[in-house]
Amino acid sequence: MPTPPWHHLDAFLNSRAQAGQSAHTLAAYRRDLQQLQALLAEQNISHTLTRLQLVAVLKKLSAQGCQPRSLARKLSVWRSFFRHLLAHGLIDADPCLNLKAPKAAARLPKAVPAEQLNHLLDQTHGNDMLSLRDQAIFELLYGSGLRVSEAAALNLDDVLLNEGWVQVLGKGR
């Protein structure tokens, strides 16, 4: 009977430490792998693991309220661990092969509350050229929804004062 993969956990973590992983990251790896070991032990699985068994663990974690981003992180740790075992000839096949992480919802940028922005824009910041420039940039960003990188890329030729337009080249030009 082959050695359970968990017997190689410390060697794996040592290899990650030598690769420069932080102590915090290593502790998270240990927790994630020990959690996997415990969930598999509940199913009396300790030696040869299959893709379907790992899918069942992911489903169980999801049912327990684990968020997609956390599930993806755990799966990433599992992949790294099993790749390490495979590379050292300690397992015959990678049970994470072709295992897909659940899709995490895209995070939208947080908007500054309108009241705070209006208060900032209503403040008098001075009449010198730099203050006026900064005020104009803030107004442009707020009023148009430009990205900071788009505003920073503007040239004088892009500002059409008489027409009240600004020509912006965003992502993909």
Image: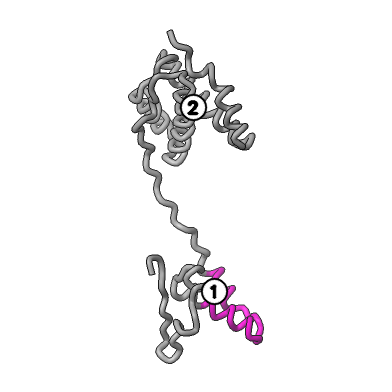
Task: Report the disc number at residue 118.
Answer: 1
Query: In the rendered image of this protein, does residue 19 appear above or below residue 156?
Result: above
In space, the residues marked 2 and 1 are separated at their CA atoms by 54 Å
> Which amino acid is tagged 1?
Asn
Q: Is residue 156 magenta?
A: no
Q: Which residue is mark 2?
A: 84
Residue under the image location 45 percent in, 71 percent down = 146
Residue under the image location 42 percent in, 40 percent down = 68
Task: Report the disc number at residue 73.
Answer: none
Q: Which residues are magenta?
A: 115-139
Discs 2/1, front: 2
Quadrant of residue 120 within the rendered picture = bottom right
Find numbered disc 2 in the image and state the secondary structure of the residue it sits on.
helix
Q: Nearer the viewer, residue 107 or 166?
A: 166
* Image quarter (top left, top right, bottom left or bottom right) of the C terminus: bottom left
Q: Nearer the viewer, residue 120 or 39?
A: 39
Q: Is residue 116 magenta?
A: yes
Pinpoint residue 164: horizontal percent, then vertical percent: 42, 87
Q: Earlier in the sequence, mark 2 or mark 1?
A: 2
Neighbour class for label 1 at 10 Å: few (<14), some, many (≥20)? Answer: few
Pinpoint residue 143: horizontal percent, then vertical percent: 46, 75
Find numbered disc 1 in the image and state the secondary structure of the residue it sits on.
helix
Pinpoint residue 117: horizontal percent, then vertical percent: 54, 70
Residue under the image location 54 percent in, 74 percent down = 118
Query: In the rendered image of this protein, does residue 28 appear above or below residue 131?
Result: above
* Image quarter (top left, top right, bottom left or bottom right) of the N terminus: top left
Q: Nearer the viewer, residue 27 or 158?
A: 158
Quadrant of residue 56 within the rendered picture = top left
